[in-house]
Image: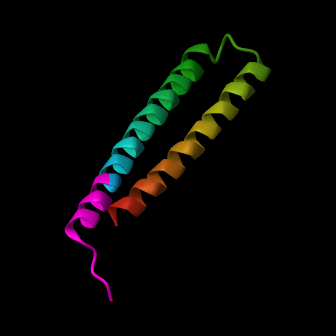
C-alpha cells in the first residue's frame, strides 16, 4: 500500500480548503438571496398580485433548495 507523499497531502488539504472557502461563499450568497426574497415577500405581500406572489414564493423555494444542498455538502466536508 502506497502512502501519499507530504506534497500530495498538502495539495489535497489545499484543494479541500479552497473547496471549503468556495462553499462558504456560495452558502453566504444563497443566504443573502433568501433574505432578500423573504424581505420582499414581507414588504410587498399586500401590493403584489397573486401571480407575482406565487412567482416570488417559487423563487424562494428554489433558493432554499439550493441552500439545503449547499448545507449538505458542508456537512459532508466537515465529516
Residue 38 magenta-drawn?
Answer: no
State whether residue 31 is above or below residue 76. above
Who's the residue at 52% across and 49% down the image? 68
Residue name at image x 39 percent, y 37 percent: 25
Q: Residue at x 33, y 89 (%)?
A: 1
Residue 4 highlighted magenta (yes or no): yes
Q: Residue furthest top?
A: 47
- Depth check: give the residue in front, 14 or 77: 14
Q: Residue 41 location, x and y as percent?
A: 59, 22
Closer to the camera, 58 or 42?
58
Magenta segment, prevailing SS (helix, strand or loop):
helix
Name the quarter where the C terminus is drawn: bottom left
User: Residue 71 at x, y = what percent?
Assistant: 45, 51
Q: Is residue 59 above or below residue 49?
A: below
Report x, y in % for residue 66: 56, 44
Q: Residue furthest right?
A: 51
Q: Residue furthest left?
A: 6
Report the side of 23 relative to 51 (left or right): left
The colour scheme used here is rainbow
Question: In this figure, what is the number of numbered marks?
Answer: 0
Q: Position of residue 23 (x, y in %)?
A: 41, 45
Front in this rendered view, residue 59 or 74: 74
Viewed as shown, does residue 9 lie left or right of 43?
left
Q: Is residue 63 left or right of residue 74?
A: right
Name the foreground residue: 69 vs 6: 6
Tell me where residue 37 sits by quadrant: top right
- In the rendered image, the vertical position of residue 62 relative to residue 7, given as above or below: above
Q: Which residues are magenta?
A: 1-14
Tell which residue pokes out farthest to the bottom in this image: 1
Amino acid at each position: 500500500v502506497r502512502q501519499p507523499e507530504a506534497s500530495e497531502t498538502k495539495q489535497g488539504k489545499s484543494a479541500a480548503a479552497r473547496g471549503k472557502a468556495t462553499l462558504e461563499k456560495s452558502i453566504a450568497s444563497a443566504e443573502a438571496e433568501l433574505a432578500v426574497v423573504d424581505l420582499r415577500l414581507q414588504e410587498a405581500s399586500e401590493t403584489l398580485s397573486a401571480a407575482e406572489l406565487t412567482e416570488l414564493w417559487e423563487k424562494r423555494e428554489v433558493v432554499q433548495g439550493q441552500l439545503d444542498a449547499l448545507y449538505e455538502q458542508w456537512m459532508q466536508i466537515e465529516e
